[in-house]
Amino acid sequence: MTTSTATNSPSAMEEHAHGSARWELWFAVVAGITYAAGMIAEYAVGLPLMGPPLVLFIATYFFGGFFTVRTAVTSTLRGKFEVDFLMIVAAIGAALIGKWAEGAVLLFLFSLGHALEEYAMSRASKSIEALAELAPRTALVRRRDDDPVEVPVEQIVVGDVVVVRPNSRIPSDGFVITGISAVDQSAVTGESMPVEKEPVADRERAIRTVDTLPAANRVFAGTVNGSGVLEVVVSATAADSTLSKVVELVRTADQSASPTQQFINRFQRWYVPAVILAVAATLLIAMSILSQPFTDAFYLAMTVLVAASPCALAIATPAAVLAGVARAARAGVLVKGGAPLETLGRVRAMAFDKTGTLTWGNPQVTSVTPVDGVDGSLLVPTLVAVESLSDHPLAAAIVRDLAGQVSAAERVEASDLNAVVGRGVRAAVKGEVVEVGNLRMFDEQGLTLPSSVEDAYTEARDSGQTLMIVRRGDRFLGVVGVMDTSRAESAQVLRVLRSTNVGQLVMISGDNQRVADAVGREVGVDTAIGELLPEDKVAHITRLAETHRPVAMVGDGVNDAPAMARADIGIAMGAAGSTVALETCDIALMSDDLGRVPFAVRLSRATSRIIRQNLIASLAIVVLLVIATFIGLNIGAVVLIHEGSTLIVVANALRLLGFEHGKEHAGIDHEDRTAPRVDPRGTSPRHGRCRVE
């Protein structure tokens, strides 16, 4: 039989599942009506059982058992004997001894409980499904400079230009080429504040380097545009957008069973056959030792069978995992299933990559120290003029951070730039030779630094900065320090992690050891290790795991992929902008927000706590019901309590949907990633603040 692609799509399968759940609820309602009618006919009206009451009870068997039988047959053919199988056995047993009313109420209550359970669980799944509905169905596409035409999003191709109107949803991933606006990205990245967007400077270069574009240039499908009109070049089709990948990963998250769920699955493999043996033993004991008639003994055995069925036990872990994954997704934390969700809460050591994780990943001017006198005033204009000719990342940082401090009257032009490999650069400004480089450049010329420059150089070097000494003609102008600065929230996040019993915090980096030590001291890690190649990072994670397992590794998910794969939990930051990060990590922070790591740890521990509560309650209820059956509790009451306990377990798990960050997270600083302002007298960059979850 040929099946269309649409039928196999996730949305089509979800629609089919929801339709089945609705039918199951209606069947349960009809089963309740026929059961009630049968009870009235037999006991209120006084009709004989073998007349209309039996017909009504058989109807209850059909409507109450339809979905139960279907599930039982499917699982049995796969070699699994689950709760549905036990319920069918109990209902058939009740019918065989003439207890049609008891069998009917068993199937009615079981089907009703299962339908209500599905309804309750849908609350968690709706949080996930809501993500899929964020992307608009159509988009305004401008092709070949024509007027924009509305087309289905499925027809958008990479390279198309889409026009995004104010207060509308962005239809696809891409980068801005026209317009300025603030975009609400909370649905995808979890960021609480809109992100300002602006056009790229070079469209052709942006197409080649789309994965490395700044956040200010990139947009994602499903996010909401603000008050400005944007034109966006599409970088991914609807099927390949970040939103689509997130939805698919969250939908399939339950395929990664948590350690507790794996144990429960193994437990159920022998528990269900053990229940069957216990029921048989109950029947024999009741007949031989208690001398009960076969009918009474068989009824007792069927009641024990229902009481011992692990309904609540089976749903205890999946319900909590689904709710936890859905809550994390709402906060911009993508958790790939129960295994990482539960394991993260047990982490006792956490390793961080330096660049782009504890630091911003892009150099910034951190100190400017001019010499005393008139020559010092020439430092910034001369440096900006020379570095504006260079395409080196450090040169770009200098021009970005210092160009605004040069007035029109101070501006000078440089020419004839030449690189001195391993030393620096030379250029000409107003006929004078300008040299910008490291200490080696001037030591090799036998030049001695002025005492003020030498002192500033030594102090800045010890703090881990990369330093450039500036000389113009025959005089030194000063020294400038550049550094990949740590995030303002890094130190505070690490303190919060310590308060959650993550005892060992390690920073691993490819930078030189002096830089690693400086950043490590600033953020407060226990150990800072520099000068590491990717394979060295893997070795350090291995050694850390020998004494502090489980271990989590936090990085960008690209060059840190080997170390993240070696760790028990790999956490990628800023994964919304990286397909590689989404695919290689266990947990993805969709925004470039380190402050969500403590949130994820606390959510993991809350999930584990809910799972433990559910398992204890489930087992306790099974034990109490089994004992109660021998005291005389009938099968209807057993089923009612049994299904009620299942609903309670699900409701307890759904509390995770309302999980909030703790008070200890309030006030964590989050550094503004815009260019810092550096005063020529050497002041530090000023930082913005925003709330971090």
Image (cartoon, rainbow, N blue to C red):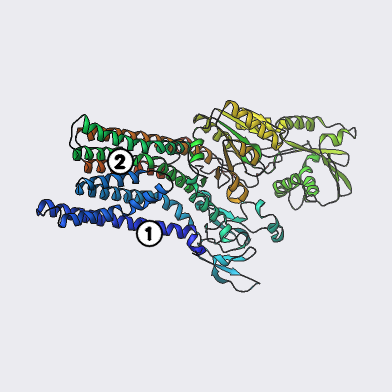
Q: Position of residue 528 (x, y in %)?
A: 65, 30
Q: Residues within 10 Å of mark 2 (few under 14, many from 20)?
A: many
Q: Quadrant of residue 586?
A: top right
> Could you tell which of marks 2 and 1 lies nearer the N-terminus?
1
218 displayed left or right of 445: left
**Position of residue 537 measured from the top left corner of the image (x, y, whole percent):** 67, 34
Q: Which residue is mark 1?
A: 19
Instruction: Count how many numbered circles sit on residues in the image.
Output: 2
Q: Is residue 684 visible?
A: no
Q: Quadrant of residue 522?
A: top right
Residue in the image at 61% along x and 70% along y: 142
Checking the image for residue 645, the label placed there is 2
Q: Is residue 178 above or below residue 287?
A: below
Identify which amino acid the numbered label 1 is placed on. Answer: Gly
Q: Residue at x 42, y 59 (%)?
A: 15
State how far apart marks 2 and 1 are (Cα). Answer: 26 Å
Residue closer to the observer: 522 or 91? 91
Q: x, y percentage for residue 96?
A: 23, 47
